[in-house]
Image: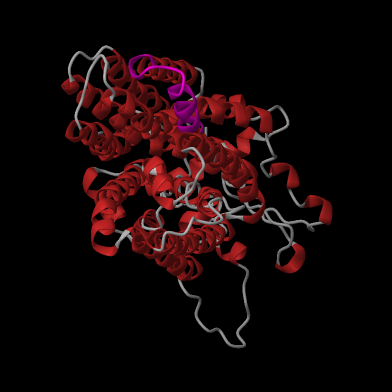
Amino acid sequence: MAIPEICNAEKMIGSELLYLDAVGFQEKKRPLLKVDTLEELKPKKGSSFKQIVVALAANVGTMNTGLVFGYSAVSLPQLQAKGSRLLINRHQASWIASVSTIGTPCGCILSGYLTDLVGRKKTLLFTQLPAIIGWIMIGSATSVEWIYVGRFLAGLSSGMIGAPSRVYTCEVSQPHLRGVLSGFASVGTSLGVMLEYLAGSILDWYTLAYFNALLSTTALCAAFFIPESPSWLISSQKDEKRCKASLKRVRDSTCDVDVEVNNLVTFSENNTKLSAKKKLKMICQASTVKPFLILTTYFILSQYSGLNVVTFYAVDIIKDSGSTLDKYVATILLGVIRLLFTVIGCMLMWRFGRKTLSYVSSIGCGLSMVCFGGYMVQHDIWKSQGITPRATWVPVMNLSTFYAASTIGYLIVPWVMIGEVYPNQVRGVVGGLTTCVGHFSLFVVLQTYPIFQEHFTKPGTFFIYGVVALSSTLFIYLYLPETKGKSLQEIEESFVKKKKPDIGNKVVVPDIVNNLPKAAPNVVV
């Protein structure tokens, strides 16, 4: 049965509305009154509660990323302590800390392929299997090689979860909730870091690994109960029935699901499934290349603002700063601040959008890093002169400010936009590549941090991070698009919108008239 095309508008030239008949596309004319605005045909807001629950279930697995980040910080001191069940040296400890970052980019690429091939839900289920196996291997390890493999698998899972969780959340949520719900992935990561710091202060390293495996199993079970992405069901499966059923599960009875399905069908018909060659061609088009360059640059700038250096080297940084606060207590405090401001950032994104929060991060991180480096210089001067350091609370305050500012924008915005800015047909693949770049930039920054300290001194390193953060403000102003309140179709079209010609005093004909369907010679019903 054919689906009639409906032209939705409040006013037209001549105050007439053309209704299209499904059989003959016959024109019917009558005056268009204000009451005939066809508001009933516009998608209504669905149940916020249902969308929140589905988004939560899809993002439980993102906690594994935080678990991977935090595990080395709390487990390495235990593994290096005398009497450890498995004693390691400093060289082995560095590999345990970094090997997960090798698996993460691999997971990003793999999940990007699977997200489009088998669907969002199945990919979310599959991502938890390497994490469960990896954490169990670490917990039962009898040699350091087992820990290497387990950390690699956990990192692989961490990379795999990034793109599908965000893409899925964007596709099942409506525009008024999408910004908040897409931030759940960042909340999950921050929650994982905090849980790892807290649990690591109580549990030994192998029991902590089993605890992590239990959380990954919980994420696997949660993903079983979510519906498949309606956008994927239409674009890849052409299954309107399942698409409608999926939408009903994440909306409510007051939401006009039929119109939303019709919109997805119409959009999909204009974006038919592509072969590998055509998909590669689409990846090279402006609608994909432009947002890819914007997001990858965003990731690089945010990482070289010191974003995750503080997370991975928190204990050493606090110790070198001259603060008198216990370094482990300070680490837990930073974990709590990260979680708190991740939640606050998601709420602020709903109100202020992506660019505003990015400004907060770039300016806040820049100033706090410069001040932190300045205090370290002054601390070294006091130390060389034999003077007791003063205001030892300043470095912790600077780091807390840095954590709060970076979390609000840097840790949320680019990950949310991965699920927003790419064309539907290549969203999974390019989203995975973008996530890969994000994690690879993390690996590079972590590897270059000791090199920077050696060549530019410790205070100089933080000065560099501060300057990069401040300079990224200009990039955000010039290139970062604002996606708040826009549909995914509107965002995609914004990257290929052509400049309108100068029409001078010519008569302007509304786009809605030009876009009216032309009579077709043969209509199949």
Could you say which is closer to the camera, residue 427 or residue 231?
A: 427
* Secondary structure character of the magenta stretch overall: helix
Whether residue 482 is visible to the viewer of this picture, yes or no, is no
The residue positioned farthest toward the bottom in the image shown = 505
The image quarter in which residue 220 lies: top left
- Judge whether 194 appears above or below 443 on screen: above
The residue positioned farthest toward the front in the image shown = 386
The colour style of the image is: secondary structure
- Judge whether 471 appears above or below 87 on screen: below
Residue at x 34%, y 58% (from the top left corner): 458
Could you say which is closer to the camera, residue 279 or residue 50?
A: 50
Q: Position of residue 284 (x, y in %)?
A: 28, 57
Q: Is residue 200 magenta?
A: yes
Q: Is residue 231 magenta?
A: no
Could you say which is closer to the camera, residue 77 or residue 130?
A: 77
Left or right placement of residue 116 versus residue 174 in this view: left
- Judge whether 43 appears above or below 294 on screen: above
Q: Which residues are magenta?
A: 191-207
Q: Position of residue 264 (x, y in %)?
A: 51, 41
Residue at x 49%, y 19% (from the top left corner): 222
Left or right placement of residue 232 versus residue 159 in this view: right
Q: How many marks?
A: 0
Q: Position of residue 498 (x, y in %)?
A: 45, 70
The image quarter in which residue 178 lies: top right
Q: Position of residue 116 (x, y in %)?
A: 34, 36
Residue at x 31%, y 53% (from the top left corner): 282
Left or right placement of residue 152 versus residue 323 in this view: left
